[in-house]
Image: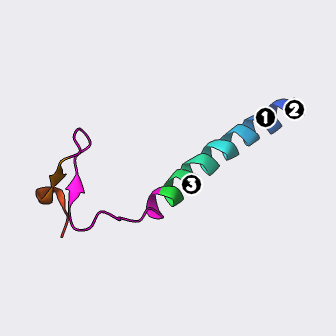
Amino acid sequence: MLARRFTIVCLIAMLFGMGFAMLVAEAGRVNRRGPTAHSAFCQIPCPELVRH
């Protein structure tokens, strides 16, 4: 029973850690392309997608 609880706690901690790592990785990304943004479906620069 103790092993089952430990496993559940470890799985929950792993999910939380992976979610936090994804947030940190996304926040650490640097926009190197300049003022234009690219659509998720094409590689053509789309100036109207830039947030001001």
Between the C-alphas of marks 1 and 2, the distance is 6 Å
Q: Sequence order check: which comes first, mark 2 or mark 3?
A: 2
Question: Which element carries disc 1, helix, strand or loop?
Answer: helix
Q: Is residue 9 or residue 27 the one in the foreground? A: 27
On screen, residue 6 versus residue 39, left or right, reads right
Q: Which residue is mark 3?
A: 20
Labelled disc at residue 46: none
On screen, residue 23 versus residue 39, left or right, reads right
Q: Quadrant of residue 15?
A: top right
Q: Is residue 6 placed above or below 19 in the rendered structure?
A: above
Which residue: 73% across, 35% down? 8
On screen, residue 21 versus residue 51, left or right, reads right
Q: Residues within 10 Å of mark 1 (few under 14, many from 20)?
A: few
Question: Closer to us: mark 3 or mark 1?
Answer: 3
Q: Residue 42 at what x, y percent from top left?
A: 22, 40
Between the C-alphas of marks 2 and 3, the distance is 25 Å
Quadrant containing the C terminus is: bottom left
Q: Amino acid at mark 3?
A: Phe
Question: Which element carries disc 3, helix, strand or loop?
Answer: helix
Q: Sequence order check: which comes first, mark 3 or mark 1?
A: 1
Q: Quadrant of residue 27?
A: bottom left
Q: Which residue is mark 1?
A: 7
Between the C-alphas of marks 3 and 1, the distance is 20 Å
Labelled disc at residue 3: 2
- Residue 40 included in the magenta stretch of the image: yes
Q: In this picture, which residue range is highlighted in magenta?
A: 26-43
Which residue: 52% across, 51% down? 22
